[in-house]
Image (spheres, rainbow, N blue to C red):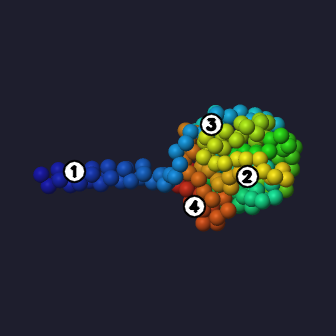
Amino acid sequence: MKAGKHLLILTIFIFLGMLLSACGNKIEKNMSEPMAEFSFTTQDEYIISLDDLKDEWWITYFSYTNCRTVCPRTTANMVDVQSELKEDNLHPKIISFNVDPANDTPKDLKEYAEEYGVDLSTWDFLTGYDFETIQEISKNSFHAVLEAGAADQMAHSYMFYLVNPEGEVVKKYDGMSMDELDTLIEDVKIVMK
């Protein structure tokens, strides 16, 4: 009887250990929205779609090359995120949705990426759609405002978003906050390890 109790206790501990380890790759979500289907042109003039990102965790944000307000900072911050994750041998795909597709060509986006020292092996800047298309994606998938403003400036989200392998936007982070960037990095480490 004593051996049976020990076996039962051992079985319970094994089960609890398995349960806890299965929960180890969970993050606290603050969003749950399906990512809109898309098929857009990259800075290297190839097409990338939502289907190409299935089964991967990826990070996304909004930017454009003539932005004089938040984009210089958010793009530089995303470069830092990419660099820190590379140090841990983590290479999530990063997608930058362009909010000025009428003016930003693939060539412009490639030059912009080079200016910021972006590693384009895991990061794509997207264009090749109309403003209304990206405005709908911003509104429906990210619950973010995107409006054309004065002097060719766009009012757009400065948030970073984490998208799961099923194409669900699961979390947003303030792309201007160092604390939130640290949280993004830690969350990516949790879900990708």
Look at label 1 and name its amino acid. Answer: Leu
Q: In front: mark 1 or mark 4? A: 4
Reply above or below: 30 against 181.
above
- Provide the residue designation for mark 4: 183
Name the residue that disc number 1 marks.
Answer: 8
Residue 155: mark: 2
Q: Tell me what residue is drawn at x 71 percent, y 36 percent.
A: 133
Question: Which one is closest to the eye, mark 4 or mark 3?
Answer: 3
Q: How many labels, in total? A: 4
Q: Amino acid at mark 2?
A: Ala
First in sequence: mark 1 vs mark 4: 1
Looking at marks 3 and 1 on the same chain, the residue that comes earlier in the sequence is marked by 1
Instruction: First in sequence, mark 4 or 3: give its number.
Output: 3
Instruction: Report the residue at 42% width, 49% height from top.
Output: 22
Q: Residue furthest front?
A: 150
Image-based side of 105 in relation to 19, left or right: right
Extreme residue in the bottom direction? 179
Q: Secondary structure at mark 3?
A: loop
Mark with earlier residue (4, 2) = 2
First in sequence, mark 2 or 1: give its number: 1
